[in-house]
Amino acid sequence: MSRKPLSREFYNRDPVLVARELLGCLLLRATADGIGGGRIVETEAYLSSGDPACHASRGQTRKNRSMFGRAGHAYVYPIHARYCFNVVTEPEDVPSAVLVRAIEPQQGVALLRQRRGCHGVHELASGPAKLCEALAIDTELDGWDLTLGRRLWIAAASDARTDQAVVGRSARIGVTSAHDLPLRFYLKDDPFVSGPKRLRA
DNA sequence: CTACCGATTGACT
DNA sequence: GTCAATCGGTAGA
């Protein structure tokens, strides 16, 4: 399985394409405690225009400045005393991103479990804030360059399960606006996807 | 300075 | 299904 980081060109595209193609890729996080990570099974796109749910829709602030930067960097922000991790897409000054909502733990599972407390494997990273806690992602990594291949990055990883999986699409979870936009992507029937069951199948 | 709020989660009916 | 804890960012006095 390759651990080579995805290129700038991969991220420098329409967030809908990036969100769709990130499914099945390997999210990796290296710390002094070791490497942890897993297979991305659920993402959401946030658009630079026509999307009131995007944090950048009301202009640039200190909090969302990463989204206005180059593609391939992290956008990490705090919410409800937790964190969410996004990858920035499209060129500089085009503020769009893809939220990574869930992974299937594969690397360093014991480490992830330790960070989350004793939880079942399906509860380790099935949600954007759970994933950040399991991988020790916080605002210190806001703006981090994901193409460097260290600390935090994403690698392509094809396997038969992903190739054969059906991709589902739905409204985004939790947002208070733009429920009409089907910008959430997930692997259908995958047990590591977050949210209510009716949104998984 | 205070007040309000959210791309959440987990506990509870 | 409902609901409250939680806290940094932001707007407004």
Image (cartoon, coloured by chain):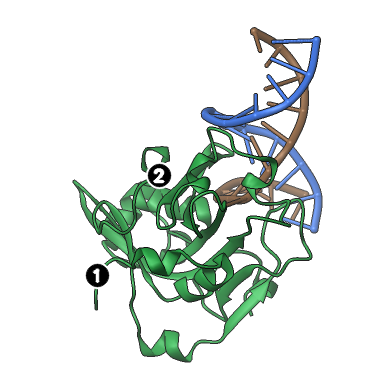
Chain colours: A green, B brown, C blue
**Camera-side mark, 2 or 1:** 2
Of C1 and C12, the residue lying toward us: C12
* Left or right: A34 as drawn, with respect to A157: left
Left-right relation of A15 to A180: left
**Image position of A55 with respect to A158: above or below:** above
Q: Residue at x 56, y 74 (%)?
A: A186
Give the quarter of the image for residue A169: bottom right
Identify the subunit bearing mark 1: A
Would you say residue A38 is visible in this rendering? yes
Residue A109 appears left or right of A80: left
**Residue A193: x percent and y percent?**
54, 69
Mark found first going from the N terminus, 2 or 1? 1
Tag 1 residue: A3
Q: Is residue B8 above or below residue A173?
A: above
Question: Around disc 1, counting alpha carbons within 10 Å, would you say few (fewer than 14), some (14 to 19), or many (20 or more)?
Answer: some
**Residue A192, position in %: x, y?**
49, 70
Chain for disc number 2:
A
From this view, report whether residue A148 is shown above or below residue A156: above
Please tell me how crowded label 2 is: few (under 14), some (14-19), or many (20+) other residues with Cα within 10 Å: many
Residue type at tag 1? Arg
Q: Give x and y (percent) for residue A91.
A: 49, 57
Which SS class for mark 1?
loop
